[in-house]
Structure formats: structure tokens, C-alpha cells
Amino acid sequence: MKDLLRAADLSGDDVTLLLRLAADFQNAPESAHDLLAHRTVPMYFAKPSTRTRLSTAAAVARLGGTPVAVGPDELQLRRGETIGDTARVMGAYAAAIVIRTFADADVADLAAAAPIPVVNALTDGHHPLQAVADLLTVQEHFGHLHGRRVAYLGDGGNVARSLMEAAALAGMDVAVATPPGYAPAGGAAAFAAAEAGRRGGAVTLTADPVEAVKGASVVYTDVWLSMGDPDAERERRVAALEPYRVDEELMAHARDDAVFMHCLPAHRGQEVTAGVIDGPRSLAFRQAANRLPATQAVLYALLTRRLEGRR
Ligand code: CP
Ligand code: NVA
């Protein structure tokens, strides 16, 4: 497997391997410090980023390489150079390409033309690096993933899709509560149901937030308006998603030892209350910290051709 474009590209064994590598990098951050010596990794960001940009830069540095951040105004794409030509040229200089943009099809085109690994650092459809860090965080907290239930509430966007695909591959039960019209699309639910089913797990799609969090070890949410969603949708989204806010009352329906998770950035008072995200059950900042070893593991595994991909 050359590229990581979505969590569903991975096999269950790949997820296990990435979590083991990420845990190893937590313990020995510089154990592969010469893998990328004298190499560069372009990071193309067409959307803002705090965590992904900086954790990827740190991960590349720990592997001995040099990250090169570029935006849409710095390359020739806006002047008409094709994605395919850009990919071929980057392949002559770089070890891998990390890209955050809008359309998944653009990342697929880049990966198809690039002779080097391409990593999706968030698109409208997927956020696989986040999902690897999320599973690492759950594993770190509970010791294991298999059989635990993760409940996702709110907008079934990129983070929800990648979380449900990765969690199902890890043998977790997945429950997703969204209003009608906001359920995860792009085949994520069908993929997760099939993979969870193979591992004795289950996927529940519901409109009822309380039903979703019952029995959950993890309660997860994301922003209601994602980067790229038109601002004109804001009012409609807030009205539809209000009942899915994670507050103390909703957390009380989850397991007694349940934790709260959020990919960040968060909007306190919208998708989550300050009391929950800043409270003792929140792992949001562990997730953010774990982006670094998780991305280091993904880059290491791709560059050393350790991932088998979905069979
Ligand atoms: N969670 C996440 O991807 O954050 P950034 O948008 O800041 O990278
Ligand atoms: N769904 C959010 C995630 C941000 C990390 C967005 O795409 O903006």
C-alpha cells in the first residue's frame, strides 16, 4: 500500500501495526531518526490547520527529514499546472507528500500520479491521521479497543467517517447519532458495518443521541460547520444539530468510566459544553498530543512499505 487516503484503505492488521508503531514512537521518539535524512516532505495545506500541520512537521523532523509547508499561492496549481504534473515533479525531490484540501478526488489524482506516498491530512470526506491518533488515545486510556463502544454525535463529516471506519477495523462497536440528512456518507457506514460484523462488533446509526451513548466508553463529537461548508448553512446546521450537543446530562447516559473525545478545534457552547471538554473525562488534549506519534507511525509505515492495505 503506497498511500493513506482514507481509514478504509487499511486492513485490521494495518491498524494494529500503526497503533503498535505509534506506541513505540511515544516511548522512543527518535528511534528512526535517520529514515528521512537529507529528504524533504512537502506539506500542502489549502485549509487552515494547527494540529495537523505542526504535528506532521514534528513527525518528519523526528524521522530526520525536512518538512516544507506550501499553500495554494506558492505552487503553480492556480496558474493552471495540473495535479498530475505537480505530483510527478514532487516525486523527483521528495520522500512523501502530505496534503490537506477540499475534494477527495484531487488527493486521489495526486496519489495516482505521484511515485511516492501521499497522505491525506484532511479532505471534505476523510481525516485518517486523526482517526489513528484517536484509536491510540482510546488504547492508551482503556488498554484495549476490541468490544468497546464509541458513540459519535453531531455532523457525520470527515472526522466521523474516518473514526467509524478505523474503529470498526479495530473491532469496536460504533454508534453514530445524527439528525436526518447529516449521516456519514461516502460508504463509511457500509464499510464500518461490514468490518465490525467480521470482528463481532456492531454499527448503529440513529437519530437519538441517548440511544447512541448508552453503553459507550467513548463519546465523540466534532464541529457543526466544517472548513469548506458554506457559511450560509450555519443557521440551519446549528438548528438541526442543537439536540446533539455533548453536555453533562448526555455524558451521564454513557458508561460510568466513559471519556469524552474531540478532534479540535472546539466551539464551547455549540457541539460541546465547556464543562465536558474542560472536565476530568475529556481526552481532547491527549488526542491532540497523540497526533505526533500517530503521524510518525503512518509516515514510517508507508515509507518502509509495511502496510498491506485492504484485501
Ligand atoms: N484536528 C485537526 O486536524 O486539527 P487542525 O485542523 O488544527 O489540523
Ligand atoms: N470537520 C472539521 C475537522 C477539523 C479538524 C473540518 O473539516 O473543519
Image: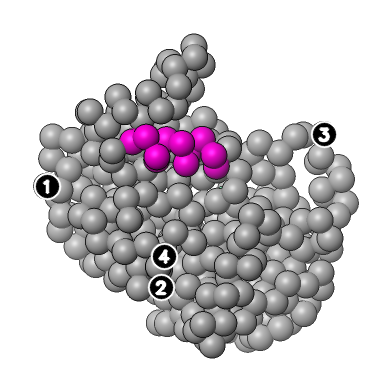
The amino acid type of the residue labelled 1 equals: Asp
Q: Tag 1: Cα neighbours inside 10 Å, few (<14), some, or many (≥20)?
A: some
Q: Where is residue 62 in the image (x, y as percent from the top left)?
A: 22, 48
Q: Tag 3: Cα neighbours inside 10 Å, few (<14), some, or many (≥20)?
A: few
Instruction: Tell me the element at label 1.
Output: loop
Which dot, 4 or 2, sits closer to the camera? 4
Identify residue for label 2: 12
Q: Where is residue 285 in the image (x, y as percent from the top left)?
A: 49, 59
Residue at 37 percent of width and 24 percent of height: 86
Q: Is residue 106 magenta?
A: yes
Q: Where is residue 14 in the image (x, y as percent from the top left)?
A: 35, 67
Q: Give 140 or 114, whichever is nearer the viewer.
A: 114
* Secondary structure, magenta segment, majority class: helix
Dot 4 or dot 2: first in sequence order is 2
Dot 4 or dot 3: first in sequence order is 3
CA–CA distance between discs 4 and 2?
A: 8 Å
Which dot, 1 or 2, sits closer to the camera? 2
CB contact under 8 Å: marks 1 and 3 = no
Identify residue for label 1: 34
Dot 1 or dot 3: first in sequence order is 1
What scheme was used to colour the molecule? one colour
Instruction: Tell me the element at label 2.
Output: helix
Identify residue for label 4: 310
Residue at 81 percent of width and 69 percent of height: 207
